[in-house]
Amino acid sequence: AQKITQTQPGMFVQEKEAVTLDCTYDTSDPSYGLFWYKQPSSGEMIFLIYQGSYDQQNATEGRYSLNFQKARKSANLVISASQLGDSAMYFCAMRDMMDSSYKLIFGSGTRLLVRP
Amino acid sequence: ETGVTQTPRHLVMGMTNKKSLKCEQHLGHNAMYWYKQSAKKPLELMFVYSLEERVENNSVPSRFSPECPNSSHLFLHLHTLQPEDSALYLCASSQDQGGGLAGELFFGEGSRLTVL
């Protein structure tokens, strides 16, 4: 069975510094996708970044990068140059790309607070 | 218009009421989802519709009844709910491109439901 684990319920970071949010996953499927979403207090889940299990390079999207370590089954999100607007809940998620059920499994989330 | 719109944003209902949540997506996607987000729990997938056919039903109680009349609209009909059903209900859509290509989910801002 697939499982996503986020062990940090809450994190603090100083504005303009970088922060790493941890995510580990468990799956027996060879083909899968890993996603990170941001959920501000408004409730909307905002897609940030995607990493495919066969991608050779770590994904990057602006200030977001994904530190993908396949052997360790980890997909940590790195946010560089933190901004006050980055304060939100962050969810790691996984989808089995061979599964036609479209199921996206989410972790329990990490609440990030950026200090001025 | 925003990509995925949910109404109402807030709903308070008694256990004997019947109400509906509405979701509309303006992204031309071919799959729509209902997720439940309870306090201190990971997002739970409830229903998935692809091309207006239900493809996933995660053992959701029958007091929740989904309806997908077309690819742009998704409803969640609610009746005789319990207080433990109080949660944020998130609608999402995605474009399934086939071949295992990533289809990130685009979420609405959610409907916060309180059952008295």
Image: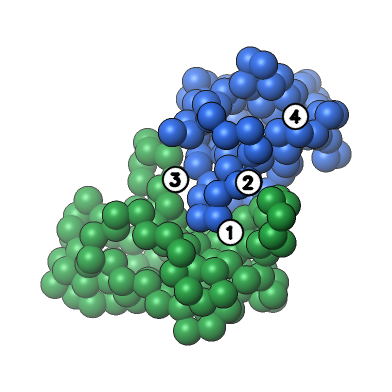
Chain colours: A blue, B green
Q: Nearer the viewer, mark 4 or mark 1?
A: 4
> What residue is pinned by disc 4?
A66
Identify residue for label 3: B43
Report the Cα–Cα distance between label 4 and label 1: 21 Å
Tell me, yes or no, whether the two marked residues, 3 and 2, touch with CB atoms within 8 Å. Answer: no
Chain letter belonging to callout 1? B
Q: Spatial distance from mark 1 to mark 3, Cα to Cα? A: 12 Å
Give the secondary structure at mark 3: loop
At 69% from the left edge and 75% from the top edge, which residue is drawn?
B28
Amino acid on which disc 1 is placed: Phe
Q: Residue furthest left?
A: B16
Q: Amino acid at mark 2?
A: Met
- Measure the C-alpha gap from mark 4 to mark 3: 21 Å
Front-most of B25 and A96? A96
- Using the rendered image of the protein, determine whether residue A116 is visible from the camera's viewpoint: no
Q: Is residue B72 above or below residue A56?
A: below
Relative vertical location of residue B7 with respect to residue A19 in this rendering, above or below:
below
Residue B23 percent location from the top left of the image: 50, 73
Q: Quick one: A95 or A92, which is closer to the camera? A: A95
Q: CA distance from mark 4 to mark 2?
A: 19 Å
Residue where numbered disc 2 is placed: A97
Locate residue B19, reporting x and y percent: 29, 76
Residue A55 location, quadrant? top right
